[in-house]
Amino acid sequence: MKTLLLSLLSAFLTIFLTFNLKSQDLSCIDSIYQNSPRNEAYQGNFEDNIFVIKSDWKKGYVIMNEGDTLIGEIKIHTDGIHIYFRNETLKKKLRADKYKVFKYDQHFFASKKFGNYPFNVEIIELGPISLYAYEQHSNYPGMAGASMRVDLVQFYVEKGSDVYGPFKLNYRDILLDKSWINECFNDCPYLLIKIPQKNLKFPDLLKACQSYNCWYYNNLGTNQ
């Protein structure tokens, strides 16, 4: 009897899922997976493309918590918590809890509190599901007094009030933790089929987030 009930339930779920998928516009998911990620800067080797923290001053702006916008030049501190700002009348060091977002050259960053304190994360994808990258660079004493640079890069995925992460890549640029994938994308089963179950790399994660946002806007609208 129990086996029969489970079989009936499985059949019902299959029929329901098939009908539900047919009523949805899934073309954007297929389109994204047939092509490269929209953001060309994040293809290929991760380490060669995503690092943007430099000591150079670049044009940009900062939107403060009070709503004021500072326009000038920005330099990003390697600690991932501070930035430097300057223009003709002002020069100061700002901490991440003092501003909401800032633009550095062509890159956009947000101040996010994914832990005990706010820090700078680069906005890779923004929407119903948002993808962020956090970078921190430090120098430590090495052998014979030489300095050794240590780069920390990790990702966060934000969906509503849920935050998944931090995630890190191994030496082959493969995402180490995939346990959250099913929970995060469970409302779009068709997309779950597309996401690689093994050797999930950064471009795969970017495609998944882009595909979900496209599917969401096409089927659920912006008011859901």
Image: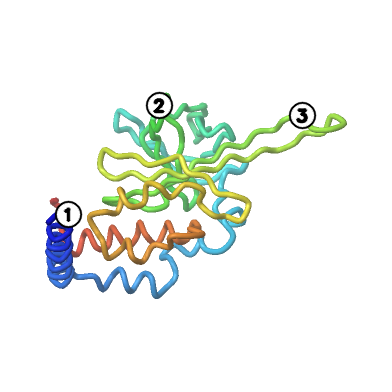
Label for residue 97?
A: 2
Sequence-first disc among 3 and 2: 2
Residue at x-position 47% and y-position 27%: 94
User: Which callout, 2 or 1, points to the residue nearer the camera?
Assistant: 1
* Residue 39 drawn at (x, y percent): 44, 62
Discs 2, 1 touching: Cβ within 8 Å: no
Label for residue 222?
A: 1
Q: Amino acid at mark 1?
A: Thr
* Residue 122 drawn at (x, y percent): 45, 45
Q: Quadrant of residue 142?
A: top right
Q: Quadrant of residue 209?
A: bottom left
User: Which callout, 3 or 2, points to the residue nearer the camera?
Assistant: 3
Label for residue 52?
A: none
Sequence-first disc among 3 and 1: 3
Sequence-first disc among 2 and 1: 2
Discs 3, 1 touching: Cβ within 8 Å: no
Residue at x-position 13% and y-position 68%: 15
Seen as rendered, the residue at the extreme right is 144
Q: Which residue is mark 3?
A: 141
User: Which callout, 3 or 1, points to the residue nearer the camera?
Assistant: 3
Residue at x-position 36% and y-position 66%: 194
Residue at x-position 38% and y-position 31%: 113
* Residue 9 drawn at (x, y percent): 13, 59
Q: Measure the alpha-carbon separation of dots 3 and 1.
A: 51 Å
Q: Which quarter of the rendering shows the N terminus?
A: bottom left
Q: Secondary structure at mark 1?
A: loop
Residue 173 drawn above or below residue 104: below
